[in-house]
Amino acid sequence: MLILASRSPRRRMLLQQAGYTFDVIPADETAEDDPLPGEAPAAFVVRLARQKAENVARRIDRGIVLGCDTVVLCDGRILGKPTDREDARAMLRFLRGRRQSVLSGLCLWPVPEGEILCETAETLLEMAALSDERIEEYLDSGLWEGKAGGFGYQDRNDWLKITSGSESNIVGLPLELLERLLSEPRTAYAE
């Protein structure tokens, strides 16, 4: 049984659309954290994915816990979810007209025992040079809330273009990576 350690409706949607059977047990907010001094972005998202998976794994008897965390990275700056509209505005102004990457850490934690798998996925994209008016229109929609970098690719914004990598990663769950990790022969996943 796959158990999603997330409150994200987008991650649920992606798993459902991909045909997975799963339960949802959100990780506690204490599993969230800020980057440590000098921590590389890839190490940061893997650490958070692992913390979320571990948080839920401690509360169940059996299953494979899926933890995931996603951030946007641009010019060495990590952008998580905006705290409010002003924060989202600042993020979008910073990102407009630039190339950026979306990094996700994914962790599979088998319970009661087995090999814990953690990896990252990266998707590169470009954002058009949005006007302040266009940014305000997007902010008015409220679609930025709860999304790394203050934007949602799934909102069908014509101002975002993937240059390489996974579309599902930008939405918040790299399905290709998940499928690969689940399909690798592991005794931990045997019934």
Image (spheres, helix red, strand yellow):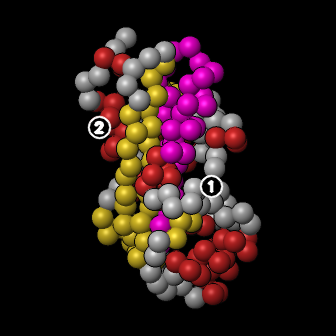
Q: Locate residue 108, reporting x and y percent.
A: 43, 32
Front one among 141 and 152: 152
For label 2, count other residues whose C-alpha is less than 10 Å away and answer few (under 14), some (14-19) or many (20+): few
Q: Locate residue 16, reporting x and y percent.
A: 48, 36
Q: Residue at x 31, y 17 (%)?
A: 187
Q: Residue at x 57, y 38 (%)?
A: 52
Residue behind mark 2: 180
Residue behind mark 1: 34
Mark 1–mark 2 distance (CA, rounded to whole Å): 28 Å
Q: Residue at x 29, y 22 (%)?
A: 186
Q: Residue at x 39, y 20 (%)?
A: 114
SS of the residue under disc 1: loop
94 shown above or below 113: below
Q: Locate residue 54, reporting x and y percent.
A: 55, 31
Q: Locate residue 130, reporting x and y percent.
A: 54, 84
Front one among 69 and 113: 113
User: In the rendered structure, which amino acid carries the disc numbered 1?
Assistant: Asp
